[in-house]
């Protein structure tokens, strides 16, 4: 029942299709995501759903690369932003105090897409007449 | 062939986020406090909400509810027994509510004008994973956990528990026979969402409802 990955894959397809339409003739080779460790997205499920969501679309065959971002909290006492190990305890790694102020970890973003474009063709007057 | 990287830096759920932001503005200007209730299936969202609606109405407050379920309008019928306006949202297989479903079901809801409400409760689909990414425009996200489902739920579902603004432990009337370890549950919630307000309640006996209702009243003034 955690198949919200399918809705998420569909949203990615929509966004990328729109972005790629600004580059006619290009094929999307790879889509790169930034996904926070707290984003409740299971990488394997998303990859599986990506295959389903792209099937029969211009994005079919495009790879999905997921960059998982660790959780970063801000510790008031230490005045630092610090990465926590895992997602089981939101404590400053330096002083051990609970840290509620989340600075990274919920991201769910398309970072970039890699396009493959045909080399520009020099105008050929003969062909143009045909 | 040449390859080229195009930076997008775009939120995957941008459409939902924008819709939700619009709803939030609408709710704020109508002066209605909107709460999104999330939990596993069967935690007791509907029972808790039934009791909440009843008690709010008894105090003269105007409250309404939208309730999401995969199928059936059973929950809406249970909630409507409180006398509050209730609308069912059937998601037909989708495991969470999204902002578009909320917007759609606010439209043409004759019994309800947002400006006439003090509270609007949204009971999400029973699921501890999927609802966490979908902003519904709520001001307060409430996560519920029953005494029967294990004290380590917050550790298993940190994404959702960390996104909540308040936590409700339900069914405390059966805590003892269930061997519920209260201290451990409170500790686990606090490790995942430090400082969160926690209410310990029973929809059956009404225990803990006073503190919850006081919190609601306080939040409408905030
Ligand atoms: N003993 C006891 N049982 C409760 C309490 N609250 C709910 N229940 C029971 O728990 C079961 C599930 O309650 P619901 O209110 O339907 O739970 P829910 O979270 O709305 O369920 P879904 O909408 O299906 O996700 C029912 O059999 C309720 O009678 C409570 O405070 N005490
Ligand atoms: Mg219910
Ligand atoms: Zn510190």
Image (cartoon, coloured by chain):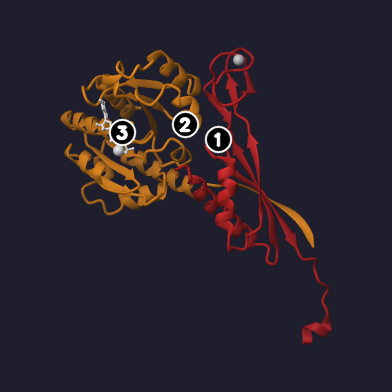
Chain colours: A red, B orange
- Residue B174 at what x, y percent from top left? 28, 20
Q: Considering only vertical position in the picture, is B165 above or below A12?
A: above
Q: Secondary structure at mark 3?
A: helix
Tell me if the residue at label 3 has its CB under 8 Å from ligand 1: yes
Image quarter in which the N terminus of chain B is found:
bottom right
Q: Considering only vertical position in the picture, is A101 above or below B67?
A: above
Q: Is residue B111 visible?
A: yes
- Return the residue nearer the eye: B206 or B195: B206
- Return the residue nearer the eye: B154 or B120: B154
Horizontal arrangement in the rendering, residue B20 relative to residue A38 (left or right): left
Q: Which mark is residue A26?
A: none
Callouts 1 and 2 close, C-beta under 8 Å: yes
Report which residue position mark 1 lands on.
A106
> Residue, x 36% and y 27% (percent of image)?
B222
Circle nearer the N terminus (2, 3)? 3
Which label lies toward us, 1 or 3?
3
Report which residue position mark 2 lands on.
B163
Q: Is residue B211 visible?
A: no
Quadrant holding ligand 3?
Answer: top right
> Residue, x 24% and y 41% (percent of image)?
B116
Q: Considering only vertical position in the picture, is B174 above or below B164?
A: above
């Amino acid at each position: 029942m955690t198949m919200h990955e399918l809705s998420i894959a569909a949203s990615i397809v929509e966004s990328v299709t729109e972005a790629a339409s600004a580059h006619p003739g290009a094929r999307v080779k790879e889509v790169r995501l930034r996904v926070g460790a707290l984003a409740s997205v299971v990488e394997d499920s998303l990859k599986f759903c990506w295959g389903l969501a792209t099937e029969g679309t211009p994005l079919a065959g495009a790879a999905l690369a997921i960059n998982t971002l660790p959780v970063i909290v801000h510790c008031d006492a230490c005045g630092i932003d610090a990465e926590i190990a895992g997602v089981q305890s939101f404590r400053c790694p330096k002083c051990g105090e609970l840290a509620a102020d989340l600075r990274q970890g919920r991201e769910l973003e398309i970072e970039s897409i890699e396009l493959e474009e045909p080399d520009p063709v020099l105008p050929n007057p003969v062909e143009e007449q045909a | 062939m040449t390859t080229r990287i195009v930076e997008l830096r775009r939120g995957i759920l941008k459409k939902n986020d924008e819709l939700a932001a619009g709803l939030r503005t609408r709710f704020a200007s109508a002066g209605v406090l909107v709460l999104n209730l999330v939990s596993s299936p069967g935690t007791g969202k509907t029972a808790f909400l039934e009791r909440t609606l009843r008690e709010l109405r008894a105090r003269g407050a105007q409250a309404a509810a939208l309730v999401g379920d995969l199928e059936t309008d059973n929950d809406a019928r249970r909630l409507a027994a409180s006398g509050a306006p209730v609308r069912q949202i059937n998601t037909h297989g989708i495991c969470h509510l999204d902002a578009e479903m909320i917007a759609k079901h606010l439209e043409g809801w004759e019994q309800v004008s947002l400006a006439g409400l003090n509270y609007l409760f949204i009971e999400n689909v029973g699921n501890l994973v999927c609802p966490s990414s979908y902003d519904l425009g709520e001001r307060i996200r409430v996560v519920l956990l029953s005494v029967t489902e294990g004290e380590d739920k917050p550790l298993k579902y940190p994404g959702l528990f960390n996104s909540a603004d308040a936590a409700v432990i339900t069914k405390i009337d059966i805590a003892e026979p269930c061997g519920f370890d209260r201290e451990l549950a409170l500790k686990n919630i606090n490790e995942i969402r430090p400082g969160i307000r926690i209410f310990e309640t029973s929809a059956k006996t009404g225990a803990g409802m006073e503190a919850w209702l006081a919190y609601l009243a306080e939040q409408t003034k905030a």
